């Protein structure tokens, strides 16, 4: 049935809330990733050498913002184009980085769960809905599929 205007609106509306405190939600996002999958710590260069999640690490914040923003942009593209389109250079970079970091399919589910839980906390129980969760989930899944396809291409080229 395609991504609706209402779904796009829900994603954009909640993104505006998230943007109001990016440092806090970035930290929360990574805390949730490590709570769900402690072994993922070594996949992030900015977490490997640290015993705890660094409060003011610009790389952590930048990475979280990329995930939030690219997922939001995916929602807009899904409604406008019916698919997620990532610029070739960005896509090649994402594929390479994820392969080098040892990212596998199940890791995308961990990030999705952390993203949805972070959003739910940011939005609050009274505004968070199954519809909003599904809109973000769909946008994230479509983005993840594009990245996974590029990872496979990247892996095939180096194999």
Image (cartoon, helix red, strand yellow):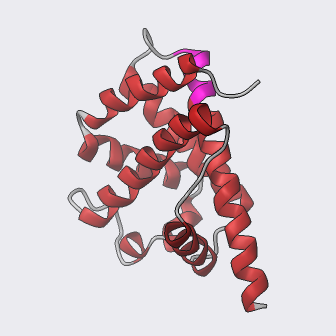
Question: Number of callouts in the render?
Answer: 0
Residue nearest the viewer, comparing 87 with 153: 87
Left or right of residue 127, residue 130 in this image? right
| Side of 58 where 145 appears, left or right | right
Give the percent coordinates (x, y) of residue 40.
56, 64
Q: Is residue 152 above or below residue 23?
A: below
In the image shown, does 78 or 37 lie closer to the viewer?
A: 78
Q: Where is residue 30 drawn, in percent x and y?
A: 42, 52
**Residue found at the far left of this picture:** 56
Query: Does any portion of residue 126 appear in the rendered image?
Result: yes
For the C terminus, the image quarter is: bottom right
The magenta segment: 129-135
Residue drawn at 32 percent across, 59 percent down:
62
Tell me, yes or no, if residue 104 can be seen here: no
Q: Quadrant of residue 1?
A: top right
Which picture quadrant has residue 95?
bottom right
Whether 112 is drawn above or below 124: the answer is: below
142 or 76, which is in the foreground?
A: 76
């Amino acid at each position: 049935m395609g991504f609706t205007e209402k779904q796009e609106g829900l994603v954009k509306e909640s993104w505006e809330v998230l943007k109001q405190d990016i440092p806090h939600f970035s930290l929360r996002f990574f805390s949730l990733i490590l709570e769900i999958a402690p072994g993922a710590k070594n996949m992030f260069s900015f977490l490997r050498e640290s015993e705890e999640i660094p409060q003011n690490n610009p790389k952590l914040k930048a990475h979280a913002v990329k995930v939030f923003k690219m997922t939001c942009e995916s929602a807009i593209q899904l409604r406008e184009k019916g698919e997620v389109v990532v610029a070739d250079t960005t896509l090649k970079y994402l594929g390479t980085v994820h392969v080098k970091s040892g990212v596998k399919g199940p890791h995308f589910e961990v990030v999705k769960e952390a993203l949805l839980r972070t959003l739910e906390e940011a939005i609050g129980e009274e505004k968070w809905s199954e519809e909003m969760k599904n809109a973000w989930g769909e946008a994230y899944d479509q983005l993840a599929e594009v990245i996974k396809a590029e990872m496979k291409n990247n892996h095939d080229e180096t194999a």
